Image: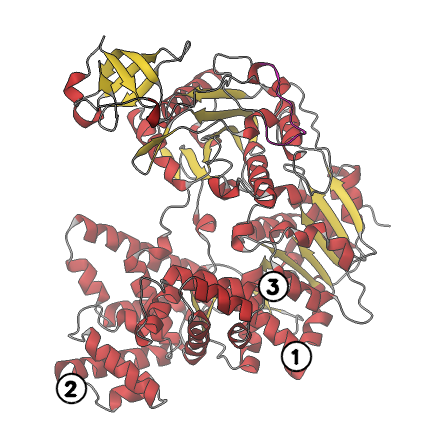
């Protein structure tokens, strides 16, 4: 066998996972265990063994992951990496559908609808059916239809499924199935697919198998590799089995994942796919990557302790050689505001004492709403920060407007794009005229362009429609023989969008102009980018097409996460879900309270608690050097102050892994799981469970509360005001209550129901 230098970089288990290339293989990759390296080197090794790279398909969940793998692969094998099909599920299947779309009744230039496009069409359908939009909300319909598609339930099947029908009736939305049917028909008429359709229609294509298209791709993709397999849903796995399970197949499928990091059940991810994988492939070979190259010993120990509380899992024991590391810090705060302040104080300490830069610090929270307090305190401290999960560049109105022009130019049947921009800039075409036009086209089964010629609309609106039609048809013809940047410039100028934005001299107008300029620059970059692609036979490398169709597909599959950059030295704020796949020197996991983390919705179902625990596992394993866990004894939610118990997860990390500091958590409750042990400093010191009915209270005006005044609180009982901070509506009383020997309470007077004595 040829000696391959890159294999020398692997540990023993990684080596076996890389070099076992035939038959079904499962690689359980713990956090920081080098799974990307294993995937990359496995592909390189297969190519070294003479396997044609054109026969290798690698699927990931983010464009960023796919890009990183391709870059690493190119460093090992050179330009041969271009022959490997590597990308996200959606991008790869969109590529297949572009080639095969006509076999299922779609044009090759089909539009890809984002969630806003889908919700807009659903709203139109609800309006057309004269239904109550307060009951039939776009979000409800979107989620219901998306869930159906992920379970391979077609509109016809939905309408015949008594369970689904009864569920909809119970929710007072009995016509969801009909809306699903209408939506599917309108998408097809518009030559459009949504994100779910890219998977659903691929399965339909393979299942119906026109012109033996399934066999074509079974022979093409003889080796399949899937990253983050624990995040696959029923539909994704069903497509994989279509490609790999057939007579005489060698079942050359390698999956890489970690059941302990399965955190997307709310998106339809099915953890059973990885837990029960061996049932579908009895000849499975399993390799566990248990060495962690990222985190210190105490963090790894804590992660092992926590995940062992889960009920159903693939057992593994993560270990690290980085024994000399800091213990985990804990912070107890009296309020969510104090929690934020203490975290910012700790950030200063990490920056000064440990010389950690802002960009290597992350604050992770369970819900995005928790970011506000941290933002305020970071701003006060003059610490730059960045929020992940904010508005995507491609979701801005001005950007979506111009993209809608481009969509309509390449797909003349795109109804949502037509609706969006037919009167942008203002052309005197009102909503009534648009509805009349579209309804006429629908009723007479003709295109909207034919309906314009029928002169259903009169006056200025009709002349404007004719001019608009002329513009779009001219641009459509121009797009057939010109690159995307030239098409974009033509549409931008001729539509008078350029004039509209240039004339707006407001600050908002300047900002919109900057976004448009950035978009046009991006299109030019796309055209000029030096990239190659295989022809359909995979025999030669050809120059990649730079048309508008290709550009629109490239940006339609970009996620918010793929758009994020690490430019600048800023503290990172994000949900735990958004942190998946990232790592930082210092990580703060905040809001560790029962009903928040774990969430209130999970408390009464074992499987949901297990998912929350996996989420906590992901959070703590993002940390390389320093990990800080924080919680507040009171928190403002929906205008009320709530008192939650500290999270059970705080106990589960294990006392031996915690630093002995003044921040050591107290008041922790015993775990609900009989396997839990309450240890030393985590001993119970419960908050008195007083209720408002204990005391006959007459609430006093704010002016009655001054330092030294005795008070009676409905929950905490009798106390004395120590001091008062803040002004006006923000006045905060610091009160020592008789029932608390060690702590003072901070109570916002505006909302306090207290009596001055």
Q: Name the residue under label 1.
A: 209
Which is the main secondary structure of the residues drawn in magenta? loop
- As drawn, is 717 to the left or to the right of 629? left
The magenta segment is 671-680
Q: What element does badge 2 sit on?
A: loop
Q: In which quarter of the image is residue 741?
A: top left
- Residue at 67% across, 58% down: 80
Q: Nearer the viewer, mark 3 or mark 2?
A: 3
The x, y position of residue 317, in whole percent, is: 73, 33
Q: Distance between the residues labelled 2 and 1?
A: 48 Å
Q: Name the residue under label 2.
A: 458
* Label 3: few (<14), some (14–19) or many (≥20) C-alpha neighbours in 10 Å: many
Q: Would residue 676 be counted in the magenta stretch?
A: yes
Q: Distance between the residues labelled 3 and 2?
A: 48 Å
Quadrant placement of the C terminus: top left
* Label 2: few (<14), some (14–19) or many (≥20) C-alpha neighbours in 10 Å: few
- Give the colour scheme shown: secondary structure
Placement of 542 over or under 586, stated as above or below:
below
The x, y position of residue 52, in whole percent, is: 74, 63
Q: What element does badge 3 sit on?
A: helix
Q: Is tag 3's residue or tag 2's residue first in the polypeptide sequence?
A: 3
Q: Would residue 665 be counted in the magenta stretch?
A: no
Q: Distance between the residues labelled 1 and 3?
A: 17 Å
The x, y position of residue 432, in whole percent, is: 20, 77
Q: Mark 3 points at which residue?
A: 235
Kindly give the residue lying farthest to the right in the view shown.
1
Q: Is tag 2's residue or tag 1's residue first in the polypeptide sequence?
A: 1
């Amino acid at each position: 066998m040829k000696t391959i230098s890159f294999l020398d970089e692997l540990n023993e288990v990684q080596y076996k996972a890389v070099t076992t290339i035939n038959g079904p293989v499962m690689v359980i990759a713990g956090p920081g265990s080098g799974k990307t390296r294993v995937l990359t080197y496995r592909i390189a090794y297969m190519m070294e063994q003479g396997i044609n790279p054109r026969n290798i398909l690698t699927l990931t969940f983010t464009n960023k992951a796919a890009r990183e793998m391709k870059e690493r692969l190119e460093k090992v094998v050179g330009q041969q990496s271009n022959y490997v099909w590597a990308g996200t599920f959606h991008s790869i299947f969109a590529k297949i559908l572009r080639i095969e779309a006509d076999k299922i009744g779609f044009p090759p230039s089909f539009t890809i609808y984002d969630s806003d496009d889908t919700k807009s069409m659903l709203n139109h359908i609800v309006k057309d059916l004269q239904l109550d939009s307060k009951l039939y909300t776009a979000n409800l319909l979107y989620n219901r239809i998306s869930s159906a598609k992920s379970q391979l339930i077609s509109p016809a099947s939905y309408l015949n499924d008594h369970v689904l029908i009864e569920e909809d009736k119970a929710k007072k939305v009995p016509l969801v199935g009909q809306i699903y049917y209408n939506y599917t028909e309108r998408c097809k008429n518009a030559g459009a697919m949504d994100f779910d359709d890219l998977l659903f229609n691929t399965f339909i294509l393979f299942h119906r198998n026109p012109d033996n298209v399934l066999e074509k791709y079974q022979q093409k993709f003889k080796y399949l590799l899937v990253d983050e397999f624990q995040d696959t849903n029923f539909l994704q796995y069903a497509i994989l089995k279509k490609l790999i399970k057939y007579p005489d197949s060698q079942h050359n499928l390698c999956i890489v994942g970690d059941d302990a990091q399965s955190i997307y059940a709310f998106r339809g991810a099915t953890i059973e796919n990885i837990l029960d994988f061996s049932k579908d492939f009895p000849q499975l070979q399993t390799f566990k990557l248990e060495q962690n190259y990222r985190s210190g010993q105490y963090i790894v120990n804590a992660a092992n302790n926590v995940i062992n509380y889960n009920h159903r899992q693939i057992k593994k024991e993560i270990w690290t050689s980085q024994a000399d590391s800091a213990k985990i810090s804990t912070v107890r705060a009296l309020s969510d505001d104090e929690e934020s302040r203490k975290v910012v104080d700790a950030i200063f300490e990490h920056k000064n004492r440990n010389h950690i830069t802002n960009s290597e610090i992350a604050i992770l929270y369970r819900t995005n709403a928790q970011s506000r307090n941290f933002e305020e305190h970071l701003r006060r401290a003059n610490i730059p920060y960045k929020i992940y999960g904010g508005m995507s560049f491609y979701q801005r109105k001005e950007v979506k407007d111009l993209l809608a022009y481009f969509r309509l130019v390449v797909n003349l049947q795109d109804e949502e794009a037509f609706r969006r921009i037919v009167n942008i800039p203002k052309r005197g075409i009102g909503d009534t005229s648009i509805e009349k036009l579209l309804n006429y086209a629908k009723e007479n089964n003709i295109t909207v362009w034919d309906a314009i010629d029928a002169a259903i609309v009169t006056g200025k609106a009709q002349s404007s429609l004719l001019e608009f039609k002329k513009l779009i048809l001219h641009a459509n013809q121009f797009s057939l023989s010109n690159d995307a940047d030239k098409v974009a410039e033509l549409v931008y100028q001729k539509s008078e969008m350029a004039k509209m934005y240039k004339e707006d001299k407001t600050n908002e107008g300047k900002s919109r102009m900057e976004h448009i300029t950035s978009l046009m620059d991006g299109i030019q970059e796309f055209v000029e980018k030096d990239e190659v692609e295989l022809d359909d036979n995979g025999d030669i490398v050809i120059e990649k097409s730079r048309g508008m169709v290709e550009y629109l597909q490239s940006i339609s599959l970009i996620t918010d996460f793929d758009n994020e950059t690490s430019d600048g030295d800023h503290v990172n704020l994000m949900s735990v879900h958004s942190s998946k796949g990232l790592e930082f020197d210092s990580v703060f996991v905040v809001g560790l309270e029962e009903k928040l983390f774990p969430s209130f919705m999970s408390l009464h179902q074992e499987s949901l608690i297990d998912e929350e625990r996996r989420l906590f596992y992901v959070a703590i394993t993002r940390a390389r050097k320093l990990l800080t866990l924080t919680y507040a004894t009171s928190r403002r939610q929906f205008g009320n102050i709530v008192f939650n118990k500290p999270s059970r997860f705080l106990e589960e990390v294990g006392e031996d892994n915690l630093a002995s500091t003044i921040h050591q958590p107290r008041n922790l409750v015993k775990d609900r799981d009989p396997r839990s042990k309450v240890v030393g400093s985590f001993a119970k010191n419960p908050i008195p469970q007083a209720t408002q009915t204990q005391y006959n209270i007459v609430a006093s005006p704010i002016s009655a509360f001054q330092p030294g005044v005795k008070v009676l609180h409905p929950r905490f009982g009798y106390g004395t005001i120590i001091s008062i901070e803040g002004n006006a509506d923000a006045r905060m009383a610091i009160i020592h209550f008789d029932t608390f020997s060690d702590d003072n309470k901070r109570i916002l007077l505006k909302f306090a129901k207290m009596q001055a004595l």
